[in-house]
Amino acid sequence: MNKPEISVIVPVYNAEKYLSNCIKSILHQTFQNFELLLINDGSKDSSPEVCKKYQLCDNRIKLFNKENGGVSSARNYGIDKALGNWIVFVDSDDSIDENYIYDLYKNHIDENCIVFQGFKRISRIGVEAITSEFKHDILNKNNFDRLFSEHKILYCGNPFGKLFNKQHIINNNLRFNTNIDFGEDLIFVLEYIERIDKVVLISGTNYNYFIDNNGSLSSKKYSFEKEFLIFETMHNIFMRNNSSWKYDINNFCLRYNAEFLFRSIFSLYRKEHKRSRKERIQILRNLKTKYQSYLANYESLGLFNWGNSLLKKDYILLYDFYTNILFFARDSFAGIWNRYQKYR
């Protein structure tokens, strides 16, 4: 096989139920000059056997088996093994339409760019698909702020639906952060963007992103340190690029990253990672001093919104008391709380 133009990287972990559909959709692409890297991340089901079956039928497929290290570790492994000039990511429980690779590849300008395309969000329980689509646009560093204010790319931070240049990744030592449990894909995309000159956004939705409706990484909760690391990493990226991204005056960006800040604040009250009152007060005071702009731009719904207004007004002791009661009520009366959240 000659050197492929594109490497398609698929992390695989216990994906036997949907893996065949994913692989078939990749092999049926109209653009054929690619290699398919299946990174088995220590699967305990029949996923390795499924991969092996397809590998025997198509010499473009390469199967790599590694110890379980998480999706970021698997994607990084794929980057290191990729031979193509360009990289495309696909998740093992998703699928792609036949022109997915072709549409991304034909719209690249040069090696110093990234190509974005939207996707279809599809529920496996029969709920109608939700489409996230871009208007065709080409942006350079002078107007990268429009990526956030107009195109809202923070909502499309997944690695799929994008074309990355392999050499650009290698030259800048870009990798998915294995110390972050969620949001690491958006961080990777932002770190890639800060090192390029052009972003191409194309219309269409050739990626099928399936939702099982049984929980996701974004719905899982972690300790304050892990939650805050995500916020702080995002904050540092935006501040490094403030002159071109206009982060400090872009309320959309501030509100988006404020969600990560408040996730870390709420982790102080969840029973799994709860801190003492003294620790909570000290952390809240430090955050209030350093990240006032986020607090001013954050709005939540329902009961939490009143608590947020207390924090904005610097009523930290009252905020702590109120929020502690809310989380106690949520944990003690989970059924009632969930019904309230559903119908608020």
Image (cartoon, grey):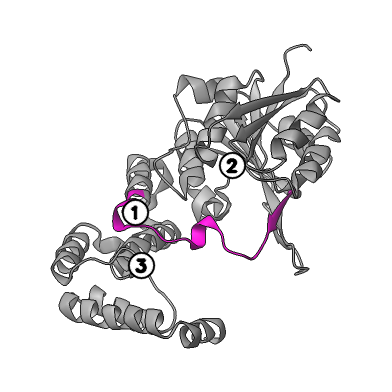
Looking at the image, which is closer to me, 138 or 192?
A: 192
Q: Which residues are magenta?
A: 207-229
Answer whether labels 3 and 1 touch (C-beta < 8 Å): no
Looking at the image, which is closer to me, 342 or 205?
A: 342
Say few, some or many: other residues with alpha carbon within 10 Å of mark 3 (under 14 / 14 to 19 / 20 or more). Answer: some
The number of numbered badges drawn on the structure is 3
Q: Is residue 10 above or below residue 110?
A: below
Q: What amino acid is labelled 1 in the image?
A: Asp
At x 79% / y 33%, what residue is drawn? Answer: 102
Of the numbered discs 1 and 2, the one sitting upstream in the chain is 2
Of the numbered discs 3 and 2, the one sitting upstream in the chain is 2
Q: What kind of element bears circle 1?
A: helix
Residue 235 position, x and y percent, is 34, 49
Mark sitting on residue 159: 2
Q: Residue tagged by mark 3? A: 297
Q: Residue tagged by mark 1? A: 248
Q: What amino acid is labelled 3 in the image?
A: Asn
- Please indicate whether residue 58 sits to the left or right of residue 270 in the image: right
